[in-house]
Amino acid sequence: MSRIGVAFDKARADGRAVLVGCMPAGFPTVEGSIAAMKAMVEAGVDVIEVEIPYSDPVMDGPVIQRASDLALAGGVRTADTLRIIEAVAATGAQVVTMTYWNPIEQYGVDAFARDLAAAGGTGLITPDLIPEEAGEWLAASDAYGLDRTFLVSPSSTDARLKMTVEHCRGFVYATALMGVTGARSQTSAAAPILVSRLREVTDLPVGVGLGVGTGAQAGTVAGYADGVIVGSALIRCLLDAQDQATGLAALRALSAELAEGVRNPAR
Amino acid sequence: MSVDAADPAAQVPDAAGHFGRFGGRFVPEALVAALDELDAAYRKAMTDEAFRAEFDGLLRGYAGTPSLLYPATRLSARAGARILLKREDLNHTGAHKVRNVLGQALLTKRMGKTRVIAETGAGQHGVATATAAALFDLECVVYMGEVDTQRQALNVARMRMLGATVVPVTTGSRTLKDAMNEAMRDWVANVDTTHYLIGTAAGPHPFPELVRDFVRGIGEEARQQCLDLTGALPDAVAACVGGGSNALGIFHAFVPDTGVRLYGFEAGGEGVATGRHAASITGGSAGVLHGTRTYVLQDEDGQTIESHSISAGLDYPGVGPEHAWLHDQGRATYLPVDDDEAMAAFELLCRTEGIIPAIESSHALAGALKIAPQLAAELGREPVIVVNLSGRGDKDVHTAGQYFGILDKE
């Protein structure tokens, strides 16, 4: 059973893709991030991806790095992330957590799984944890009924794709580009190929991330994927804004544009 | 390379790169294919006579190894121990690091890659990488924290003279760990053409094992040289530990010799109790950083804490996973040496032997001076201590000049 599967089932019934919007916990503040995530939900984002800020985020580009640094400088703790997840899940939106592995290991893998489940989180996306190293997380996620999203990449061999999806529950995250997070002017040509390779080995929904920043791009990705994952472009709305109100307005506008995009898949 | 069943270090890591509970691969999936490719190339090379011959030829004919094992007589008289210095400072580019970069540059060629990237703190690994890149006609990009590019402007110029591009890193704390993050990001994006030439025995599998094997000649040479010189193995081997490649390099051959004590000296900075240090084993805890599980300087939430040391080359908040394992096994002893102790040893070696050591290596010297009396008491005689003098101090002249207040006013 998958917690996040509900969102994908609903979108599939509507003939569209799920929109996943990412925001670091505690950016710009704990309360500010809750407000931003709620605004995204109201504007049509289906799933909120709450990223736990980490001091050494090797998979992230400059925008998420900067937002994470600001959140950490503001003193956000792992326990605050759980509070944020609880507040956003209370709106009825699905919440998935993205985290580098060390914060979870230090919190305690089983303890984090227990508290995440209690907060209403659906599961984890783990950018620097591959299934071979995930023994403790596999056990804890089974124990608390949480979803597990591992990443696959265009460079993954067929054997690794198969092995990785066998360890996923909920959805699989296809990194569309060879590179770090950040909006690009064009979405990747490698992404549809990777998604079709995944279809050969799994029935799990496939989310595609890295590089999407506009409604049109969201529509393109929605044409072949089950989920469109957007991070940097949304975060930039807040980073670039003069004040919170302006930032939230820009965030709502982009969320709405992306939500429209996933409802108009390019086929 | 022969595998000795009696050698505990020959049994680690396992096939997935685990040294007991340490090591492994904590990386984005995008890098797994490249790590597998590297692993295959490395294992093939290690059993390939032609590769061994080419590597050995470069070590002898280009890098100037085997390095001397020098009996430091005047220093010994002060130390109450017979101190033998493994003179890695005499290698081309001035440190042990040339061994690792030559090995990895050869592998890069074998994998058909045309570009190498590296991270550097003090600039020594960057200079060594730029050197090998020039020799092997590879494009070279070196990531260096902006703070370090200012502290080590001379090495930036050296890298540029050798044809490398130096990229100042302005994220995070703008030091070595951030340079490593940025190099990983570059690698994720350019993995088809690029080899990430990691400068120490850390990072994801197979790097800790591979780097160790490229530098293990230090200990193999020193072991034989000590036997030739003294007719016996040393009582102790001492090395400084940042990431820990020079220490593993000299320890490895001695690990099966259980009568030889192994000492790793970490950078104690302003003192471990002050929190301003780089002693990951003594003052850190187990965690995941830069692709491996090891001892890390971190807060309760697993956020990396910035390290501090007068030695830029030891100024790193993690340590190679094999050291974490040797520590847990009790096979090696890790102790902190603070900035002042290291600088006192730096000055002593200058004045007694006419050798200006790297500040990194001065930590090993200071540590040897510290353990000598208790070792002498335990053994009831003058102990023989091999100290890895891993690098020369030319790069540190400015830092040392400031520390001792001997620079003319600018």
Image (cartoon, rainbow, N blue to C red):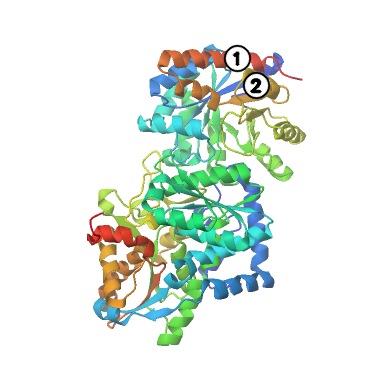
Percent of width and height locating residue B348: 26, 71
In this rendering, the answer to whether A24 lies above or below A128 is above
| Residue under the point 50% across and 15% down | A250
Left or right relative to B373: residue A139: right
Q: Residues within 10 Å of mark 1 (few under 14, many from 20)?
A: some
In this rendering, the answer to whether B328 lies above or below A218 is below
Check disc 1 and report the residue beneath it.
A257
Q: Amino acid at mark 2?
A: Ala
| Residue under the point 63% across and 58% down | B108
Say which chain tag 1 marks: A
Left or right relative to A100: residue A5: right
Between the residue at mark 2 and the residue at mark 1, the CA separation in whole angstroms equals 9 Å
Say which chain tag 2 marks: A
Check disc 2 and report the residue beneath it.
A218
Q: Amino acid at mark 1?
A: Glu
- The answer to which image quadrant residue A205 occupies is top right
